[in-house]
């Protein structure tokens, strides 16, 4: 079984193959290049990153909770609650992959089982947007060759005092993502947009 793992440059959030070929990220394709909406304020983004890291270290039994900022701890507590109540067993964290055919890249939050059913979980700490179903569809198709099962797709929305677990079941979600990807590539090919890092 082939594993298609890209090289990742944190500065600029850039992906590329071993031969240097650039790979556009799923989030860039959906949000930035296709112009659906822009990212929120940096404070919320930084908190979201911190929550993701705290959840990852918790899964890996490598978390010193005394180091968790006060504004992150309530989200972590809701994550722990979700893990227990939904019987989530995390199998892999923060997986860097690229699609072997379509050549886009991304980082999957988690491959996990939920009550014994295997799937992809993407954690969100903000409000729900329409693009979340496309993001998960793109991630699932990116790694489907690595798994015998037909993976489920879930968003885990964490708030300071609650969580919501949403399954994505749209049969056209991946085709809709590919439409966005085609629009993104047309913009690059016609000079309407430049690729990140160029």
Image (cartoon, rainbow, N blue to C red):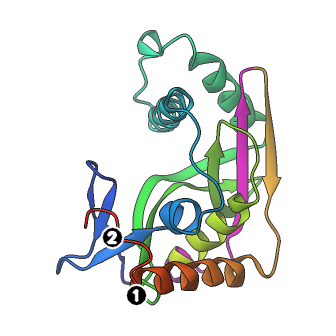
Residue 183 lies, in percent from the top left, at 57, 82
Q: Which residues make up the magenta segment?
A: 143-160
Image quadrant containing the N terminus: bottom left
Q: Quadrant of the C terminus?
A: bottom left
- Name the spot of residue 75 as percent of width and height, x first: 64, 25
In the rendered image, which residue does mark 2 sit on?
5
Which residue is more in the foreground, 193 or 124? 193
Give the left or right position of residue 103, taking residue 72 as reference. Answer: left
Comparing 165 with 9, the one in front is 9
Magenta highlight on residue 63 = no
Question: In this rendering, is residue 36 above or below 150?
Answer: above
Q: Position of residue 195 (x, y in %)?
A: 35, 70
Q: Residue at x 17, y 81 (%)?
A: 19
Question: Crowding at label 1, few (<14), some or many (≥20) Cα neighbours within 10 Å?
Answer: few
Circles 1 and 2: CB atoms closer than 8 Å? no
Secondary structure at numbered mark 2? loop
Q: Nearer the viewer, residue 119 or 36?
A: 36
Q: Label 1 vs label 2: CA separation?
A: 25 Å
Question: Can residue 29 be seen from the camera position used here?
Answer: yes
| In this rendering, the label closer to the viewer, 1 or 2 | 1
Q: Which numbered circle lies on residue 134?
A: none
Residue 117 seen from this side: no
Task: Please tell me which residue is depicted at 65% across the width and 18% down the height of the picture.
Answer: 74
Residue 145 part of the magenta segment: yes
Q: Which element type, helix, strand or loop, lies under badge 1? A: helix
The image shows residue 183, relative to residue 81, as above or below, that is below
Q: Residue at x 67, y 56 (%)?
A: 113
Relative to 164, 177 lies left or right: left
Tally the marks. 2
Q: Sequence-wise, which precedes: disc 1 or disc 2?
A: 2
Check disc 1 and report the residue beneath it: 189
């Amino acid at each position: 079984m082939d594993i298609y793992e890209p090289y990742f440059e944190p500065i600029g959030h850039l992906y590329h193959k071993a031969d240097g070929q650039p790979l556009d990220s799923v989030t860039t394709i959906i949000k930035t290049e296709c112009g659906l909406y822009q990212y929120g304020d940096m404070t919320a983004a930084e908190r979201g990153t911190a929550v993701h890291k705290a959840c990852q270290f918790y899964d890996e039994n490598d978390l010193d909770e005394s180091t968790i900022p006060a504004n992150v701890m309530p989200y972590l507590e809701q994550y722990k609650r979700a893990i227990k109540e939904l019987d989530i067993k995390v199998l892999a964290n923060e997986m860097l992959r690229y699609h072997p055919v379509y050549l886009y890249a991304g980082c999957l939050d988690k491959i996990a089982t939920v009550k014994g059913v295997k799937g992809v979980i993407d954690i969100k700490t903000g409000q729900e947007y329409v693009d979340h179903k496309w993001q998960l569809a793109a991630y699932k198709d990116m790694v489907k060759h690595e798994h015998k099962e037909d993976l489920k797709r879930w968003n885990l929305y964490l708030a300071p005092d609650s969580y919501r677990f949403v399954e994505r079941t749209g049969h056209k979600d991946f085709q809709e993502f590919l439409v966005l990807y085609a629009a993104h590539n047309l913009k690059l090919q016609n000079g309407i947009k430049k690729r990140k890092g160029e």
